[in-house]
Image: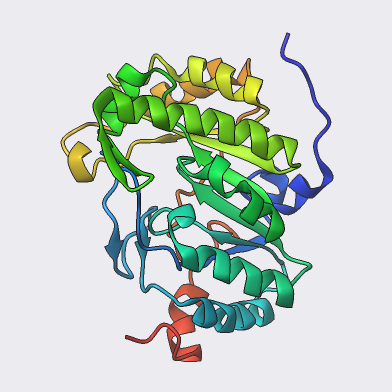
């Protein structure tokens, strides 16, 4: 039988970790991280105001602009409790991420800080994340088998070197698992996102669930493939396939089922962002071209 653990109190304050919080607590993603250090075949980063998906933002903000923008958001959303950095690239590969975290933590110490990462640099950056006061991590892990991983992530850029194929996959998976383990030991709450890709990792997600459970992750979020980038010709999973994967993995680790697959500049209560998303252009010069 699956071990039942007590829910950490702060989880009740994060709408992307807790189903009840998802309905009434606001979060903001601050887009300060444009660069990325791995190739994800399902990713296509863009600057636009139209698409609702990860990897998209209407603008890249500087740390100072991010702090000014947060000042507007804090006044607009009394329900705000979480400030996240989710790209549109890899947050841990951008110095601006850490500059922004420092500024936010100093001015708004009551807000929880969250980072969404591919995990390649997680173990290397944990000291900085802990010093910045980061409470939550979302780590995207799509496979633990290097053979499967290389079909999704054909190359990485690590320690000033381009690494391809199985070597890249082995390095990525090893760093992800160790990073999750060390982050949990630091007291951070970890969610693992797994993109469900038919005919590639759909029969492997239970193995991912077992490994991240062993590493100490709190919850897994299985999300459907969006057919873009190098995977634009691939089909997304059906609703039944997605449900089946979640049900199987739920026997191993807690599942989060309400993910909206948000933009890198999402703001508000998840699913209820319409309104401010457009109004903010009128409220401030920050997002003007």
Quadrant in which residue 93 is drawn: bottom left
The residue closer to the viewer here, 217 or 53, is: 217
Q: What residue do we see at 24% from left, 31% from top?
A: 235
**Percent position of residue 88, x then y:** 39, 59
In the current view of this chain or complex, which residue is farthest to the top? Answer: 1
The residue closer to the viewer here, 231 or 184, is: 184
Q: From what the image shows, is residue 78 above or below residue 52?
A: below
Judge from the rendering whether residue 106 lies leftward or rightward of residue 281; answer left or right: right
Q: From what the image shows, is residue 205 above or below residue 110?
A: above
Screen quadrant of the N terminus: top right
The image's colour scheme reads: rainbow
**Percent position of residue 274, x then y:** 48, 69
Q: From what the image shows, is residue 276 above or below residue 175?
A: below
The residue closer to the viewer here, 140 or 226, is: 140
Screen quadrant of the C terminus: bottom left
Q: What residue do we see at 46% from left, 66% from top?
A: 265
Q: From what the image shows, is residue 98 above or below residue 115?
A: below
Q: What residue do we see at 75% from left, 53% from top?
A: 13
**Percent position of residue 139, x then y:** 52, 40
Quadrant in which residue 42 is drawn: top left
Judge from the rendering whether residue 47 lies leftward or rightward of residue 17; answer left or right: left
**Residue 266 appears anywhere in the view:** no
The residue closer to the viewer here, 240 or 97, is: 97
**Percent position of residue 270, x then y:** 56, 57
**Residue 120 appears anywhere in the view:** yes
In the current view of this chain or complex, which residue is farthest to the front? Answer: 160
In the current view of this chain or complex, which residue is farthest to the left? Answer: 233
């Amino acid at each position: 039988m699956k071990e039942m653990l007590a829910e950490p109190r702060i989880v009740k304050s994060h709408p992307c970790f807790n189903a009840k919080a998802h309905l009434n607590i606001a979060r903001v993603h601050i887009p300060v991280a444009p660069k990325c250090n791995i190739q994800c075949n399902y990713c296509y980063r863009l600057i636009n105001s139209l698409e609702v998906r990860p990897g998209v933002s209407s603008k890249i903000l500087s740390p100072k602009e991010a702090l000014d923008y947060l000042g507007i958001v804090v006044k607009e959303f009394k329900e705000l409790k979480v400030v996240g950095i989710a790209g549109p690239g890899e947050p841990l590969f951008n110095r601006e991420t850490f500059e922004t975290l420092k500024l936010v933590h100093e001015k708004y110490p009551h807000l929880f800080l969250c980072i969404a990462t591919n995990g390649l640099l997680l173990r290397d950056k944990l000291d900085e994340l802990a010093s910045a006061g980061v409470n939550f991590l979302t780590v995207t892990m799509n496979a633990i088998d290097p053979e499967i991983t290389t079909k999704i992530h054909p190359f990485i850029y690590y320690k000033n070197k381009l690494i391809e194929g199985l070597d890249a996959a082995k390095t990525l998976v090893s760093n992800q698992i160790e990073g999750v383990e060390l982050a949990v030991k630091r007291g951070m709450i970890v969610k693992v996102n797994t993109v469900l890709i038919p005919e590639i990792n759909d029969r492997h997600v239970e193995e991912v669930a077992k490994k991240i459970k062993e590493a100490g992750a709190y919850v897994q979020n299985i999300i459907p493939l969006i057919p873009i980038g190098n995977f634009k010709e691939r089909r997304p999973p059906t609703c039944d396939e997605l449900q089946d994967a979640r049900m199987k993995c739920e026997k191993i680790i807690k599942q989060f089922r309400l993910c909206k697959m948000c933009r890198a500049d999402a703001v508000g209560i998840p699913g209820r962002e319409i309104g401010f998303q457009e109004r903010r252009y009128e409220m401030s010069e920050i997002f003007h071209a």
